[in-house]
Amino acid sequence: MILARPIALDRSSDLEPALARIGLPTPARTYLLEKLPHAQLLLTGLGRPEGRFLREACEASSAADLFPRYVSGNQELRTGTALVSGARDQLARLAETARQADGMRPLAEALERALAVDTAPEPLVLGGRRIIWGERTYLVGVVNVTPDSFSDGGLHATPDAAVARGLELAQAGADVLDIGGESTRPGASAISSDEELARVLPVIERLRARVDVPLSIDTSKSAVARAALAAGATLVNDVTAFGQDPELAQVTAAAGAAACLMHMRGTPRTMQADPRYDDVVAEVLEHLGHAIGLAAAAGIPRARVLVDPGIGFGKTAAHNLFLLRHLRELRLLGCPVLVGTSRKSFVGALTGQKAPERRLFGTLGSVAAVAASGGADLVRVHDVGEARDALAVVDAISRANDGGTLWAPAGRS
């Protein structure tokens, strides 16, 4: 899989009004917006044909300054990596040239995805609600119908308690309720489909009758998903990214449901046994890219696929933090990004709070950070009301654009 990862990719949202502020007319602003933003893209997964194409194209156009600069640590491209650096119009021209060249379509698509990394995915209709990505950060409330989840195991293990919890989270402002009947905490053992269904099905049926919030089924089993979708769930949240049950993608597609695909190294029982990566971001991207391909092969449109980096699933605390810092790169996949940091152990390690239920403030810090970075479209949390308030402030700051009449050019809201 060829990836063009933005090491730096300037955003022009504040550059345009700055140019207007100094009095430049519209044609001049348009010209400079094409020329001034500068990007550095790390290309990985290249083969020798792509490396040769890039080197020859960039070298041939160096005098005319048509294409970006190209740097490779090895002329033979044995490592499959390179760096391109230039203005947006140069990168766009390179992508178009690659698209027209024989065999260079994957390279062209990788460059195009990098240039569109800040473009919001298509809106998603979920359970009768239209979710417009980019408007705000959406909230997924956790309803664990389990006796052994790490954060609240046993508190909502009965249908009555789980339904009451779901109603509470909906009232607090959850945009989606994620209902799970099998713990995926580190070291957890698998349970049967029958046992999982006995836990979640009554909860889904009763919540569907009482709330208009979209329901998600947190499962990796096609039998559970089939029954849950028939009962009213509209999203399948699979921590194995269609990697465990080969029928799960087909069941999801047949129901017209959406899918959230998560990265996990190993299984819940083994995932924290000394996880190692050469490049954690690239490996997560490649894994999720493969999962998106499985979804497409089953008939699930990309517009109905969400991705999740799997914070805490087969990763050290350092891996988790690095992924969160580089979360924006997951947008290269062209899907909305869901992030789950709520009450997780790395939050406890950073704050010194050993009890998961005492990690609220640390969780809110992580939620605010991923929302402010523009990397997350949804956050999965246990404490919906508190997260809602934090996101209301963060989202408002991130989208603030009223700097006065001299700062905003005509037509800019």
Image: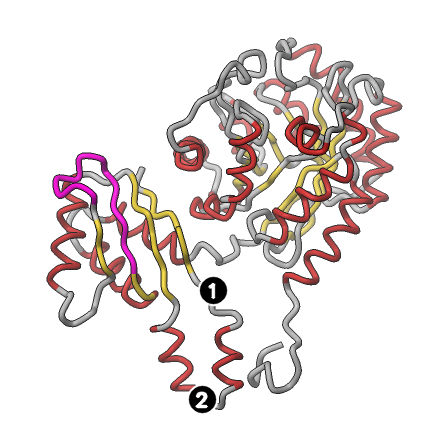
Q: Residue at x 66, y 82 (%)?
A: 404
Q: Amino acid at mark 2?
A: Leu
The span picked out in magenta is 73-85
Q: Is residue 70 visible?
A: yes
Q: Nearer the viewer, residue 122 or 206?
A: 122
Question: What colour scheme was applied to this rendering of the protein?
Answer: secondary structure
Q: Nearer the viewer, residue 346 or 342?
A: 346
* Mark 1 secondary-structure assignment: loop
Most common SS among magenta residues: loop
Q: Quadrant of the C terminus?
A: bottom right
Asked if 4 appears above or below 351 in the picture, the reply is below
**Percent position of residue 156, x then y:** 83, 22
Q: Is residue 232 visible?
A: no
**Percent position of residue 311, x then y:** 58, 31
As drawn, the label of residue 24 is 2
Q: Nearer the viewer, residue 361 or 396?
A: 361
Asked if 32 appears above or below 347 in the picture, the reply is below
Q: Which residue is mark 1?
A: 11
